[in-house]
Amino acid sequence: MPPRRTLLDDDEDFPMAGALTRAAAAAPDPITLDFGAPPETLFQQLVRHWLNERHAPDILPVQAEVLGALLDHIRRQTDTVQALRGDPDSSEAEHVRIMLVQTEVERVKFVVRSYIRTRLYKIEKFARYVVATPEVQEKLSQTELDHAKRFSQLTENHFRVSVLQALPPHQQGLDDNTPFTPPMASEPDKSHAVIVHAREECPPVRLPDGTTMQMQKGQIVLTPYAVVEQLLAVGNVELI
Amino acid sequence: MTWPNDLISDVSSPVPQTMALPLSLRNSVTPPELELIASEELVEIIPLISMERTAFISGAYGPLRPPTKAKIPLWMAMNLKMKKKCHIVPPDWLSVDFLQERLVQETSHPEFSQFPFRFTEMAKLLLDVASDDIQNSDKIRSLLKDIREARQAKSREGLQKIDHSELSLPNLCSMEINEIRPFFVRAMGVLTQLTRDPARQIGV
């Protein structure tokens, strides 16, 4: 059926889908070492990373494995639905099942899209900073990195053609480092406050006022991003 | 002369540089997005149709055999409910007795009382879709409103304790956090600027 087909093709364009199809199993992530609670499902992991990405001022490491596995699962569910729909004598109960599976696929797709768009927004916003900072580049997928490079090149060319070439030479730079003014390439503001939820007991972290804070499992705290950056990278905390 | 508000915001709002993420989504998540997340929570239903056990992306659910109760995600329950294919069993906390008791606690104690983290979203979705499965839904609505107001007052008081490094928000729920976020984050940002190393402020 053509409309479903288009939706599927649309997904195959997603940059990070490839290469990781082997992680396809929808089984809970074996890395999760939380013995008390049931392990997170793949979708729950994506939702957590999506919210982290939405709230963090910085670009977080790309979750290529989770994303690849989920996109693969979406594709398999869609294929199953296709096959079932082709069956002319399916019962009403069968229709309900198909409808529910499709609904879920749309829900997952929504989160996948929003996750990718959130990253895209930050990558474009910080494009010139990304290009100049190798440590940040490691957090991006190859497609995202290519995009960042092209995007920053395009904007630089645009600035040059439309304004800079008409200015005196010493005012043409795009990387001037004038004291007491913000840098010319926008950088993430790590002092931006975020609201964190401790997923487990956390090692102590240093607060801006010089004291230390040790978060207990379940604790919710408002604090500058820089304070919890490491905890977030390890997965001790999540942003909410 | 005062400027009309819409004119000011028109002038000061930056031209959106990118279409990747609409302006309204850049600083926070929206209530509908929180509802989407909350509808992953499991609820109990009394199915009116049979369904074999089915593999979903978030796990396998079913089989549904009327009138045996089953646990399925809220989004699935809402979907079936809207097609009149199930009754939803409201969670224990969505009852007059429970909420009444919590309201008393909320108004007699200074700290926030405990609620399921996504209770606001779940209560809203359940009351929207399945109010006929919930006893005394009108009373429940008004209790939820009273609780919300009592808790909002506490949030505002909590703002007094904010500084530039850390503020604990015990027992706050997801929707409440989202509500206070813009103001609290900004407040902390201003305090951070004020306490920054004075040497760096020279010349600003």
Image (tube, grey):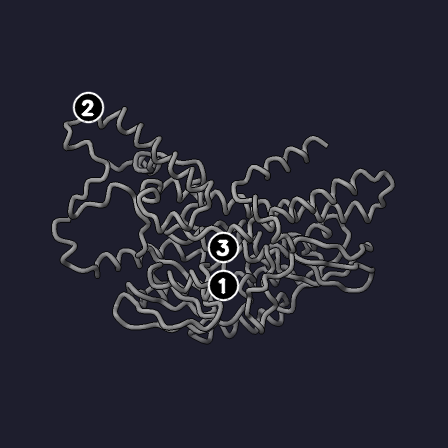
Q: Are marks 1 and 2 on the same chain?
A: no
Q: Who's the residue at 63% across and 52% down the image?
A: A24
Is label 2 in a helix, a strand or a loop? helix
Q: CA distance from mark 3 to mark 1?
A: 19 Å
Q: Who's the residue at 35% across and 63% down the image?
A: A223
Q: Residues within 10 Å of mark 2 (few under 14, many from 20)?
A: few
The chain holding disc 2 is: A
Q: Residues within 10 Å of mark 3 (few under 14, many from 20)?
A: many
* Residue position marked by numbered label 1 in the rendering: B173
Residue type beneath disc 3: His
* Residue position marked by numbered label 3 in the rendering: A49
Q: Residue B22, labelled with which disc?
A: none
Q: Who's the residue at 35% across and 44% down the image?
A: A130
Placement of A51 over or under A146, stated as above or below: below
Q: CA distance from mark 3 to mark 2?
A: 45 Å
Q: Is residue B150 visible?
A: no
Picture quadrant where residue B153 is located: bottom left
Q: Give percent across and percent down for residue A27.
A: 64, 59
Q: Earlier in the sequence, mark 3 or mark 2?
A: 3
